[in-house]
């Protein structure tokens, strides 16, 4: 016989699920759903969605991508050194804050800074406070950047992917974030060799051998960027362009330096269009008295450690 005199035995007190029976059914929808983060801003990509491989991006009809503020998990991700070095942190945060981007590894390099600026704006606002050392002095100056102006510059810049050089018509495309990251990791490893080379206690013969190897590897890294960028070359007077990757590589590795340098110069000029130029600053009286020039440039360096600080 069950004793019903105790209301906590075999019954459910109003408003409190029974601890003796099964778990209550999950509700159809999360009551907190309407309180989840919402898009803070919408942006157009400098590439306009061009150069992204199929499946790596969902292009909205308006052409404007929703940008969400970072979550606490995203902020923690940007504080993981290994993930920052190999690029995984950047990829994870971009895909979290811009759901329309499905594979950020395939992101064209001309979109990278614009996307990071947009996420920074959505998370912390349009103003970015930075510090820099005044040239020829020990003074550290604070200054502020308006990120909306910077974003407008990126989205209003045109990437010229087809151009003429002496004897050839060339078509290029921005390298992907994956390629840039791989090259950066290689360059980082090569810089470690230079540390050994600069060691006065190291064997001179060993230092020379390591320098030659390092220099060769760095040259291959730089050439790799150019080779990955070129998608077609059409000689003057011919009706079809060469697009086969192996043929393009063979040509670029064995072409006259003049031809190669013309192609590299154009790639570099297009890259610079989407890179933040240094700020030009007028020196204060205090800075002039300390030895600063009348005007000087303050480099703007965006990295995850301070940009999302």
Image: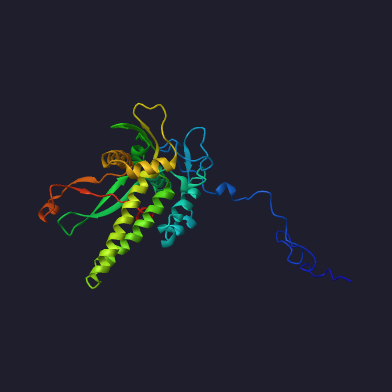
Which residue is drawn at the image coordinates 42% and 29% (left, top)? 240
Image quarter of the C terminus: bottom left
Residue 1 lies, with reference to residue 55, above or below; the image says below
Q: Nearer the viewer, residue 293 or 214?
A: 214
Residue 27 point in image, percent of width and height: 69, 52
93 left or right of 255 in image: right
Q: Nearer the viewer, residue 138 or 184?
A: 184
Residue 163 point in image, percent of width and height: 33, 32
287 left or right of 119 in image: left
Residue 230 lies, with reference to residue 11, above or below; the image says above
Residue 175 point in image, percent of width and height: 40, 44
The reply to whether residue 309 is in sight is no
Residue 124 point in image, percent of width and height: 40, 50
The reply to whether residue 21 is in sight is yes
38 left or right of 86 in image: right
135 left or right of 210 in image: left
Q: Image quadrant of residue 268?
A: top left
Which residue is drawn at the image coordinates 28% and 65% (left, top)? 195
Which residue is drawn at the image coordinates 49% and 45% (left, top)? 98
Residue 290 lies, with reference to residue 160, above or below; the image says below
Q: Which residue is at the far bottom? A: 201
Number of marks in picture: 0
Image quarter of the N terminus: bottom right
Q: Image quadrant of residue 191?
A: bottom left
The colour scheme used here is rainbow
Q: Nearer the viewer, residue 244 or 155?
A: 244
């Amino acid at each position: 016989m069950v004793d019903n005199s105790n209301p906590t035995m075999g019954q459910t007190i109003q408003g409190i699920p029974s601890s003796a029976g099964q778990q209550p059914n999950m509700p159809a929808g999360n009551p907190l759903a309407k309180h989840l983060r919402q898009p803070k801003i919408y942006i157009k990509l400098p590439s306009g969605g061009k150069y992204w491989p199929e499946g790596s991006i969902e292009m909205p009809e308006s052409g404007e991508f929703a940008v969400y503020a970072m979550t606490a998990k995203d902020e923690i991700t940007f504080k993981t050194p290994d993930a920052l070095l190999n690029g995984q942190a950047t990829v994870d945060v971009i895909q979290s804050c811009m759901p329309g981007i499905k594979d950020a590894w395939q992101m064209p390099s001309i979109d990278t800074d614009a996307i990071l600026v947009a996420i920074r704006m959505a998370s912390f606002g349009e103003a970015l406070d930075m510090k820099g050392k005044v040239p020829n002095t020990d003074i550290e100056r604070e200054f502020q950047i308006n990120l909306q102006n910077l974003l407008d510059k990126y989205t209003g810049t045109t990437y010229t992917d087809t151009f003429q050089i002496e004897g050839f018509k060339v078509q290029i495309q921005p390298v992907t974030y994956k390629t840039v990251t791989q090259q950066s990791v290689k360059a980082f490893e090569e810089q470690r060799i230079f540390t050994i080379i600069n060691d006065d206690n190291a064997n001179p013969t060993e230092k020379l051998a390591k320098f030659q190897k390092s220099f060769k590897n760095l040259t291959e890294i730089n050439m790799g960027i150019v080779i990955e960028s070129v998608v077609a070359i059409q000689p003057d007077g011919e009706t079809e362009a060469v697009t086969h990757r192996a043929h393009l590589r063979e040509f670029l590795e064995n072409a006259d330096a003049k031809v190669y340098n013309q192609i590299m110069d154009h790639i570099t000029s297009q890259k610079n269009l989407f890179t933040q130029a240094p700020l030009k600053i007028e020196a204060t009286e205090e800075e002039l008295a300390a030895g600063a020039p009348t005007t000087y440039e303050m480099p703007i360096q965006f990295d995850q450690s301070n940009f999302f600080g």
